[in-house]
Amino acid sequence: MKIYPVILSGGAGTRLWPLSRAVLPKQLLPLVSELTMLQETVSRLSGKADLQAPLIVCGNEHRFLVAEQLREIKVKPLGILLEPEGRNTAPAVACAANYLLAKDPDAVMLVLPADHVIEDAPAFLAAIERAAALVAKGALATFGIVPTGPETGYGYIQSGKAADAEQCFAVDRFVEKPDLATAQGFVAAGNYFWNSGMFLFQAKRYIEELSQFQPAIASASEAAVRLGYSDLDFCRLDEASFLASPSDSIDYAVMEHTRQAIVVPASIGWSDVGSWSALWDVQKTGADGNATRGDVYLDNVSGSLVRAESRIVAVVGVKDLVVVETADAVLVAHKDQVQRVKQIVEHLKAEERTEHLHHTKVYRPWGCYEGIDIGERFQVKRITVNPGGKLSLQMHHHRAEHWIVVSGTARVTCGDSVTLLTENESTYIPIGMNHRLENPGKLPLHLIEVQSGSYLGEDDIVRFEDVYSRA
């Protein structure tokens, strides 16, 4: 049996603001180790003989980051499917199923969110083995986490009669997030499990069940793959077809209706890291119960999570707090109140601010840039271009640019001239002039850009040529 991991890397992770942003969500961040959540998810699957190369499903805006993070851990994916817009998990998995069926009619899908913690990878792989025999016979398996307490932040799965001798059970029902008293009853009953959102099933069986219960999703997803096209290393799903699909989860679309659902109990050190308090739960803490990262000073602090991204953070005389610092925002919250972080994001959206969208450092396929200073009619950025990186041939209607090379070598196209600049050299790009910046060297190129003009927005870019196929 060939099992194809399908990694769902969509979502914005708004409950982990200010670290998680729309352009750089939690699955692409290093939250519990030096690897990002996506890298952790892919890495824990390595070494199992029947697991194939992963198939990633992600949003268009994250495609280059996803590809780069896989390259960093030396994993070549089976493919990267690009969703034009989020439509929840049922259409995403349906597109992945159709993509796999075109390559292997007997493909078995292991569906995993990219942003979960699993501390006991061998136990998780053993749970997959337990499910595989029933999946081969047509069952649709979901992994139920053995609860460690009456958690109200998760949905639950009630198990029924035993489906085989491998501790797999028929699913009696799915239950929405309960109140505390109900959750306590579930834990006491012993046949309720946390709904992990992880699945194992044959691709063709998923499409069969989806076609029966949600034919609109099935047909739209099939067309999205059939009419999609390759773009560099990515597969772009057909936009019109995909957007015609209703938005729904696997649970609502299929698992709550099929008679072939089974639940596989798993005790694997699992967390969906859905909040700052959940992240604190899975962090290593000292005797005082503090979890820290970055340049942090603590004095008489206990039970707290303190994270510094760009400067020293000093915390004195408090307990059970979450303190998260980034270059442009700081969050201070009691651990019992972190679910309200989503309200901050909604406020930022309503005020048409940008702190929920991106950090001061913005990643691009060629490298990154970081805002240093901004004022009336000027802006200063620090730009890094990776070796071999090449910005688009472009023009601006409203701003001129001054480039000063700090280190590395820059090849600069300005109109009809092409020049090489090295450390301490500079150039000027007038308003309306076609230009391009490249790094022809083997070391990163670092430069300072000073913009001046009447409008300095990132949408004042007219691209004439781009090796990364951006619009």
Image (cartoon, rainbow, N blue to C red):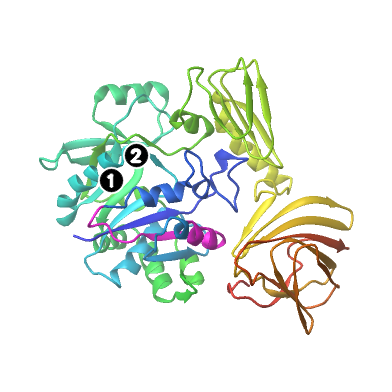
Q: Position of residue 152 (x, y in %)?
A: 42, 29
Q: Residue at x 86, y 57 (%)?
A: 378
Q: Quadrant of residue 151?
A: top left
Per the image, is 350 magenta?
no
Crowd tier of the residue under label 1, counting other residues whose Cα lies within 10 Å: few below 14, some 14–19, many 20 or above: many
Q: Which mark is residue 71?
A: none
**Element at label 1:** strand
Query: Is residue 331 depicted above or below 111 in this figure?
Result: above
Q: Position of residue 412 (x, y in %)?
A: 74, 74
Please tell me which of labels 1 and 2 falls first in the chain. 1
Query: Is residue 181 depicted above or below 211 in this figure?
Result: above
Q: Amino acid at mark 2?
A: Asn
Q: Are marks 1 and 2 in contact (CB under 8 Å)?
A: yes
Q: Quadrant of residue 189?
A: top left
**Element at label 2:** strand
Q: Amino acid at mark 1?
A: Thr
Residue at the extreme bottom of the image, as rendered = 416
Q: Residue at x 66, y 22 (%)?
A: 315
Q: Position of residue 425 (x, y in %)?
A: 81, 66
Query: Is residue 302 depicted above or below 414 in this figure?
Result: above
Per the image, is 66 magenta?
yes
Q: Specify whether 134 is left or right of 271.
A: left
Q: Residue at x 30, y 63 (%)?
A: 211
Q: Position of residue 401 (x, y in %)?
A: 82, 66
Q: Is residue 244 visible?
A: no
Q: Specify whether 247 is left or right of 195.
A: right
Q: Foreground residue, 170 or 308?
A: 308
Bounds of the magenta segment: 48-69
Q: Is residue 254 visible?
A: yes
Tell me the residue that label 2 is attached to. 195
Q: Which mark is residue 142?
A: 1
